Image (cartoon, rainbow, N blue to C red):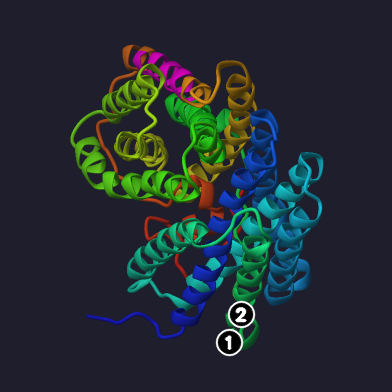
Amino acid sequence: MPTLPTSTGPLLLGAASLMFAGGLNGLILPVRGAQEGFSAFSLGLLGTGWAIGFVLGCLIVPRTVKRVGHIRAFGAMTALAGVAILLSLLLMHPIAWVPLRALSGFCFAGAQQIMESWLNERSGPESRGRVFGLYAMVNLSANTAGQMVLPLGDTSAATFFVLGAIFYALALIPTALYATQQPAPLTEVSLDIPKLWRNSPVAVAGILLVGIANSAFGTLAAVYGNQIGMSVTAIAIFVSATLLAGAAAQVPVGYASDRTDRRYVLIAVCAAAIVTAAWFVAVSPRAIVPILIGATFFGAFIHTMYPLLISHANDHAPDGDFLRTAGGLLLLFGVGSIIGPLVAGVVMNVAGPEGMFWTTAGAHLALIAFAAWRISQRAPSDTRESFVRILTARFSTPQTLVLNPRSDRAADEPQEDRP
């Protein structure tokens, strides 16, 4: 059996450092903001800012790389990300935090795309599947570790802001010292909603609604935990448990969706997420064990919807169109992620901490209604692709899709992707 290219090791270390910093950065801000008395709406704006920056990074950074090169662009992205988290420490106010969070999202998307382009360049067709699987595992582990480090110190001190900046800087080392050859240009993916709609209305509407629901939870879960009196340790476990459960649940959900109409599986998963959200609203648990049990089930449901919708869209897409379809839907997910934290922040200010779950339940209910209507309008596809196991959209870029072995492109011949 062919082994993994040895050149991927340092790059995976750089990716781990980047994801560790991203996980730490993404959790310390809502935790510290809640401690400082920021409103749920203000903290929701952090998620909106991140999503705006992330989408812009996916669109703009490939052109920047063409102009200045991979290494210089990557250095600029990691440096600015470190500056953004340090300025968040110095400027402790939501008015400053929102644009700084947008800058972080922009830099994170750019740095991640460049790192992934190196991995893609170093992995041939015979090893790309293993590289992608290892990369996904590294990302999930490092992001979880970044979140779980919070209980080890005082979140009211400067420690975790400085630590995040340190790990952003460490991510630069593998590319600065090891990568001597520039990879091929980054992939550009355009958002063509009319074409995506003609391909799969359920995927377009569903990705938008899942973006709203997942970003609402991803941004404000820590705020929910703070408002109901959870410790920092419990909040970190609460947030991490949802990601780990979502990764594990992709196997059974993918198995089921490959054997029946994916829309039925999507409706079932949405219904289960609504039931779990309703349990949080009706019972309002405050003990850590029932909260974590509920979070595990909730994460298993909400984090399998995105790959389900990508798979459904590819069932109806032209042959060899995986990258164009998945990349466009990724950007549409970003649009939903701009809306979700705003809505959830307002609802939480009115209805209390459980308002976060009201928001996710509303988005999932709308998705069930739309999917059921589409089932009555369109028969299942006669041919189905296999289920797409993919990183959670919050940490996926168009370049992640190129690295995915499902991409129709040769790893050594990336091209621009335009409708």
Q: CA distance from mark 2 to mark 1?
A: 5 Å
Secondary structure under tag 2 reads helix
Classify mark 2: residues with Cα within 10 Å, few (<14), some (14-19) or many (20+): many
Residue type, numbered disc 2: Thr
The residue at the point 35 percent across, 39 percent down is 288
Secondary structure under tag 1 reads helix
* Direction from residue 256 to residue 59 in the image, left or right: right
Task: Name the residue that disc number 1 marks.
Answer: 178
Task: Name the residue that disc number 2 marks.
Answer: 175
Q: Quadrant of the C terminus?
A: top right
The answer to if 362 sits in the magenta stretch is yes
The residue at the point 66 percent across, 58 percent down is 157
Does residue 289 appear in the picture of this structure? yes
* Secondary structure mostly seen in the magenta stretch: helix
Question: Quick check: 15 above or below 200?
Answer: below
Residue type, numbered disc 1: Tyr
Residue 187: % across, % down: 59, 59
Pick the front one: 179 or 227: 227
Contact between labelled residues 1 and 2, with CB atoms less than 8 Å apart? yes
* Direction from residue 372 to residue 335 in the image, left or right: right
Residue 18: % across, % down: 57, 66
The residue at the point 45 percent across, 66 percent down is 410
Pick the front one: 273 or 54: 273
Residue 96: % across, % down: 81, 45
Badge count? 2
Pick the front one: 13 or 286: 286
